[in-house]
Amino acid sequence: MSKVQTSVRNIARETRDTLGEGALWVARDGAFYWVDILAPALNRLTLATGAVERFLMPEPLGWVVEHADGGFVGGFRSGIARITLDPLTIGPRSGPEPHLPGNRMNDGKADATGAIWCGTMDMAEEQDSGSLYRLSPEGAWQQIDSDYGVPNGPGLSPCGQWLYHADSSKRLIYRFARHESDASSREPFIQFTEVDGYPDGMNCDAEGFLWVAHWDGGRISRFDPDGKLERSIELPARRITNMAFAGEGLDRLFVTSAAIGLPESEHDGALFEVETGGVRGNPSHAYAGPVG
């Protein structure tokens, strides 16, 4: 393992996120998107121009994924909904936990089959009432795992064999064996220490290595498929939350952060671009099913 000295650039200085998350590259738009869960807002960075736009949302928004028919699916506090931009429209919301009004969506991704994997959590972070869900391409919810304090991820291996998902409150990343429409055989994969902070958002690169954001650890790390730490990259913000590879070659890494609970500063809550030395990511996928 090595601590890598590399280029880190604060690229959205006019935007300071309370709780940046939900990193997503959308090739069809030539844009990188991320959410500010607590603003609440959806941010868009157009790579060709460097322009940053901010779309205010009606309630906390944990993640967005592309919808195959255009626009997005958003994971709101009260469930998922279709979102379109230019102009902004938001459809009706529905979700798997109407019996848990204190919960909200926290993090999610679409996979190559057109399904969405996402986590829920107690908004107040007082109970382990969160779960990991799969939303099938047909629109059916399936509870995969439960008893999460703060779920984060998922990370999806490019081989399709593994799903990585963290309970940040336990400082623990799990690995699940993937099946066509399920995930099972959960096993502890990476245990963070107090020095590491808490594992937050994550993403796999084209080589199958897992990149993890360190909340209260001020860095991102890359782990090999066996869970061995390969490199860490320090950032000038304390609460690093998520990342995604972007650009035509999927060789630009954008990293989100949070300012919540910290004094005002130049970098906490900023969006960063990190030089990865030629490492490339995987294409993002779209959900094609019904919403609501």
Image (spheres, rainbow, N blue to C red):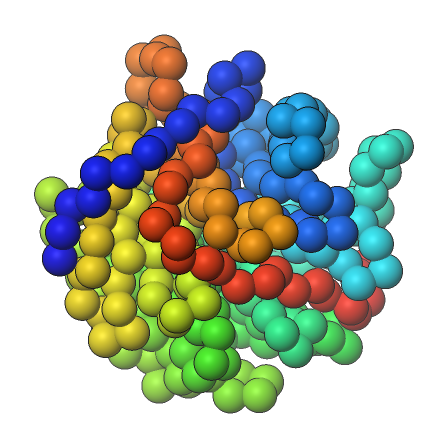
Name the residue rendered at 22%, 65% in the picture.
Answer: 190
The percent coordinates of residue 229 (x first, y second) are: 18, 61
The percent coordinates of residue 62 (x first, y second) are: 56, 45
Q: Pick the residue in front: 210 or 4.
A: 4
Name the residue rendered at 49%, 81% in the picture.
Answer: 160
- Is 71 placed above or below 60 here? below
Can residue 205 be spotted in the picture? Answer: yes
* Quarter of the rendering containing residue 50: top right
Q: Quadrant of the N terminus?
A: bottom left
- Is 259 placed above or below 29 here? above
Can residue 19 be spotted in the picture? Answer: no
71 left or right of 260?
right
Residue that protrudes farthest toward the top in the picture: 264
The percent coordinates of residue 92 (x first, y second) are: 82, 48
Q: Quadrant of the C terminus?
A: bottom right
- Is 78 placed above or below 178 here? above
The percent coordinates of residue 7 (x first, y second) are: 33, 34
Name the residue rendered at 56%, 55% in the picture.
Answer: 249
Across the whole image, how many numbered discs are drawn on residues? 0
* Quarter of the rendering containing residue 137: bottom right
Q: Pick the residue in front: 106 or 177.
A: 177
Name the residue rendered at 35%, 56% in the picture.
Answer: 211
